[in-house]
Amino acid sequence: MALNALLVFLASGIGGVLRYALSGVMHSWWGPTFPIGTLTVNVIGCFFMGFLATALTGPVIMREEYRIAILVGLLGGFTTFSSFGRETMTLVGDGEWALAAMNVILSNGLGLAAVWAGAALSIRLYGAGAS
């Protein structure tokens, strides 16, 4: 367990740095009008989550702690949206369409509401302006 936690910790840092770098490159190319950097890392993260979660549990045998480090740590540090995508597709694959739809609606709706609530609290506490 301690090795798993250490590997996830290290891989998360790498994923976060990769996210920061790629997002910055995308924003420098496209400008700040649309969150293209976030969209890019989320889509790339989802692609790799689908590919690696499938490959690393089937045709490519990998030790469990390294698989966890890659899927939870690296891709989790890169984007948590990849985990959301995988979990939703697992529900769909299990025929749990209503649960999949609820996951999409709640994750997006509550996520947006939480961002709004956090910004509102910050403004209330600190008078900080939010955009």
Image (spheres, helix red, strand yellow):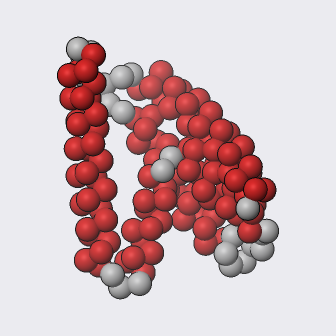
Q: Nearer the viewer, residue 10 or 37?
A: 10
Q: Residue at x 45, y 34 (%)?
A: 37
Q: Is residue 91 visible?
A: yes
Q: Is residue 43 visible?
A: no
Give residue 117's position: percent from left, percent from top: 23, 36
- 84 above or below 87? above
Q: Nearer the viewer, residue 115 or 42?
A: 115
Q: Looking at the rendering, in which quadrant would you find the C terminus?
A: top left
Answer left or right for 10 relative to 21. right
Answer left or right for 17 relative to 117. right
- 13 above or below 91? above
Give residue 112's position: percent from left, percent from top: 25, 44
Q: Residue at x 43, y 61 (%)?
A: 85
Number of disc labels: 0
Give residue 14's position: percent from left, percent from top: 67, 39
- 18 above or below 101? above
Give residue 26's position: percent from left, percent from top: 48, 30
Q: Nearer the viewer, residue 31 or 46?
A: 46
Furthest residue in direction bottom, as rendered: 95
Q: Residue at x 41, y 42 (%)?
A: 39
Q: Nearer the viewer, residue 59 or 70?
A: 70
Q: Residue at x 48, y 50 (%)?
A: 80
Furthest residue in direction front, as rendered: 125
Q: Looking at the rendering, in which quadrant would you find the N terminus?
A: bottom right
- 58 above or below 15? below
The image quadrant that residue 98 belongs to is bottom left
The image quadrant that residue 105 belongs to is bottom left
